[in-house]
Amino acid sequence: MAPLEHYLILSAVLFTLGVVGVVVRRNAIVVFLCIELMLNGANLAFVAYGSFLDSLDGQLIVFFVMAVAAAEAAIGLAIVVLIYRHRESTDVDDLNLLKL
């Protein structure tokens, strides 16, 4: 079995790639995918620590995080589709629908 540090380094790399994608990219769908990447990096850290400590708490937290991520993806994608129908663009710089 690989040491805990390897899992945590991979988790940090996944989370960092997600953060960079959210900051750099302007397409709303890509931003949602990068947020999912960040959540998967955090999930990997939870599972690694749970395995290292011989506890199921990490896997239980991952279960709830995945449920929230699925709901976020469904609602977020529905919002993006509605905005695309209205604006014909998914560029987050063009989204000023909440301004008065």
Image (cartoon, helix red, strand yellow):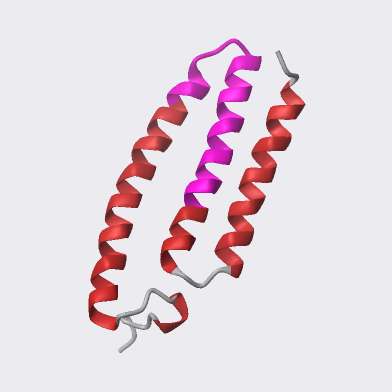
Q: Nearer the viewer, residue 57 or 32?
A: 32
- In the picture provided, is 84 more to the left or to the right than 57? left
Tell whether position 13 is magenta. no
- Determine the residue located farthest toward the top in the rendered image: 54
- Determine the image quadrant of residue 83: bottom left
> Where's residue 21, x and y in %?
58, 61
Q: x and y percent of residue 36 in the render? A: 47, 48
Rendered view: 48 above or below 22: above
Q: Is residue 94 above or below residue 53?
A: below
Q: Magenta stretch: residue 52 in it?
A: yes
Magenta-highlighted stretch: main secondary structure?
helix
Span highlighted in magenta in the image: 35-60
Residue at x 48%, y 62% (from the top left corner): 31
Residue at (51% x, 43% y) in the render: 39
Q: Residue furthest front?
A: 88
Q: Quadrant of the N terminus?
A: top right
Kindly identify the residue that appears in the image at 46 percent across and 28 percent down.
61
Q: Is residue 66 above or below residue 48?
A: below
Q: How many marks?
A: 0
Q: Position of residue 82 (x, y in %)?
A: 23, 70
Name which residue lies at 34% across and 43% down: 70
**Where does the C terminus fall, quadrant-wise?**
bottom left
